[in-house]
Image: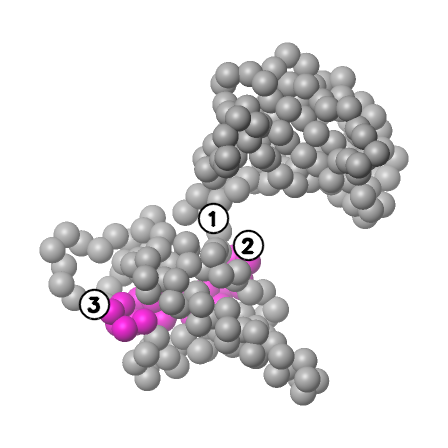
Amino acid sequence: MKTYRELYFKGSQEQLKRFVEEIKKYAVGNWKMEPQTDRWKEYLFFDYIGNHVDKARVSIFMGDNIAKGELMVGNIVPIEKSQLSVEEYNAVLMQFYDDVVKPYKECGTELDITQPSDDIFDPTSIISEEALKKLKSFCYMANKSTGSSHPCDQERWFDFICQTVDDERIFDYSTLANFLQDETYWGKKPEGFIGVIGDYAWDEEHAYELASEYERACEILQYYKRVRGM
């Protein structure tokens, strides 16, 4: 499953303030840095106006993040179309990194600028290894025509849900639904296979049903733990 790449800038307040002042000199060629205004004074906007990737605006929010010692590319929005796919978003981010950030990085800055994160989704970036182990147990053994309704499947499903709540590391609805459908991770259902149990991804309908169940169950468990002081 493809996921959005991330790009972080970490350092002292002085280093980050210097970055904010100096990075504009590197927005050249196919890049144009938008002048800051009173309305958007907490943002840095970089517009890509070339033809190698989609024309888009890369934004970095400052706010109190400088005091916290970390800035990041917070969003990329298209200039000429309504939205970018994950692949298009990542292509713009990599273009920004190669054209603007890397030259700044190579100028001798002491700022810690990471490589853009990988574009392949890693579930342990959200949930724990133990929770993933329980999700795998459920997915590999569940009847994929009935979701979590069978008592044995339900027990494994609830065990996974409780683990994520205990860990305080919880999937959001859309990420879980998309992950459950990811054939590159779970496998593709064999052509002509008529069974309902196996090492393959969930279909769209059941994936979204499970994600909805998961979201609601987590809300209830979190409420219960909060009001009972657990």
Residue placed furthest toward the right? 14
Contact (Cβ within 8 Å) of mark 3 with mark 1? no
Give the magenta part as a residue range.
Answer: 124-147
Mark earlier in primary sequence (2, 3): 2
Q: Is residue 186 above or below residue 74?
A: below
Query: Residue at point 50% right, 36% down?
Result: 83
**Label 1: element kind:** loop
Q: Which residue is mark 3?
A: 196
Q: Is residue 73 above or below residue 143?
A: above
Q: Residues within 10 Å of mark 3 (few under 14, many from 20)?
A: few
Q: Residues within 10 Å of mark 1 (few under 14, many from 20)?
A: some
Q: Which mark is residue 121?
A: 1
Q: Residues within 10 Å of mark 2 (few under 14, many from 20)?
A: few
Residue placed furthest toward the left? 192
Contact (Cβ within 8 Å) of mark 2 with mark 1? yes
For badge 3, the amino acid type reads: Val
Q: Which mark is residue 125?
A: 2
Disc 3 to disc 1, C-alpha distance: 26 Å
For badge 1, the amino acid type reads: Phe
Disc 2 to disc 3, C-alpha distance: 29 Å
Query: Residue at point 41% right, 75% down?
Result: 157
Mark earlier in primary sequence (3, 1): 1
**Label 3: element kind:** loop
Q: Which mark is residue 74?
A: none
* Foreground pick, 10 / 52: 52
Residue placed furthest toward the top? 29
Q: Is residue 82 left or right of residue 74?
A: left
Query: Residue at point 61% right, 83% down?
Result: 224
For badge 2, the amino acid type reads: Ser
Q: Is residue 46 left or right of residue 39?
A: left
